[in-house]
Image (spheres, rainbow, N blue to C red):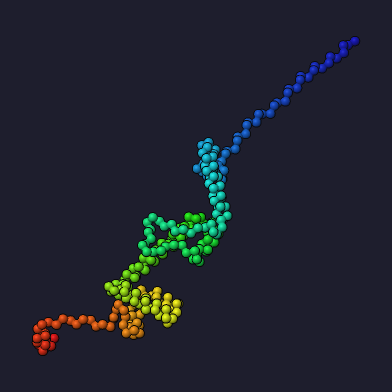
Amino acid sequence: MTDPAAPPPAAPPAAPPASPPATPPATPPAVSRPEWLPEAHWDTTANSIKPEFGQHYAEVSAFHQAETEKRNALAARKPEDIKFEIKLPETVKVPDGMDLRINDNDPRVPVIREMALKRGWDQDTVNELVALDAQQQIAAHAAEQTRIAEADAKLGANAKGRKEAVGNWLKGMKDRNELSGEEYEAVRVYATDAETVTALEKIMAKANGSVPGHNPGNPPPPAPVRQADRWYPETAQKVS
């Protein structure tokens, strides 16, 4: 009898599966300056916001808050809260004899108050407008004084007396109802011009026959005559 066949040899164990290759760590994306951040506050070396930006932001925030409160306070004002005061620069002086004051009945006052409320003008801005108007009044006053001085020079040494005489004559006409109040004022304001005073003097002379303080009809004094001309008038006539 033959031996049974030997069993086949066992198969070697299967090799374990190969592990996948390790994935390298991902590179972090590059950090860039935010669009809202000014370049002055971005550190290009560290790619980060500079530390002093925090102080800058705090200053800007405080400024914005102060401006907001200021605008709200200006908007809450009433017209009577806007004051009109004359505050001139130190280099500008009010001339002697000039009465510079605020006229509360000036029609520009309510207009400026309305504009100040509408435009958000503060008190300093209103003061500058008032000072500008005051300086214009001072300049006009100076020009008027110069004009009067030139007119007085034309009227001569007795300019003051001649103007007073004309003014008194006009007032007398008003007091006698020969001139209305409006007519008197219309003429009186021009009685400082040399030409107006001279014209009124001529009218006064026609009405009264003379003008107090001035007589434009008097002829000039005669020229002096030499003694030789008095002794020998015929010779003087021939020589002339």
Above or below 150: residue 93: above
Seen at 49% across and 66% down, the residue is 106
Give residue 96's quadrant in the image.
bottom left
Residue 41 in percent (x, y) is at: 51, 41
Residue at image position (45%, 77%) is: 181
> Residue at 53% across / 61% down in the picture?
113
Q: Percent from the top left, x then y, of residue 72? A: 57, 52
Q: Is 19 placed left or right of 40 in the picture?
A: right
Q: Can you see residue 63?
A: yes
The front one of 235 and 217 is: 217
Q: Quadrant of residue 134?
A: bottom left
User: Residue 19 at x, y = what percent?
Assistant: 69, 26
Q: Nearer the viewer, residue 171 or 88?
A: 171
Place residue 135 in its image quadrant.
bottom left
Asked whether residue 154 is in view, the answer is no
Relative depth, front residue between 77 and 191: 191
Question: Up-down: is 77 above or below 16?
Answer: below
In the visual, does 235 lie left or right of 194? left
Closest to the observer: 1 or 133?
Answer: 133
On the image, the x and y values in percent for residue 30 come to 57, 38
Name the outermost residue toward the top.
1
Name the residue at 58% across, 55% down: 76
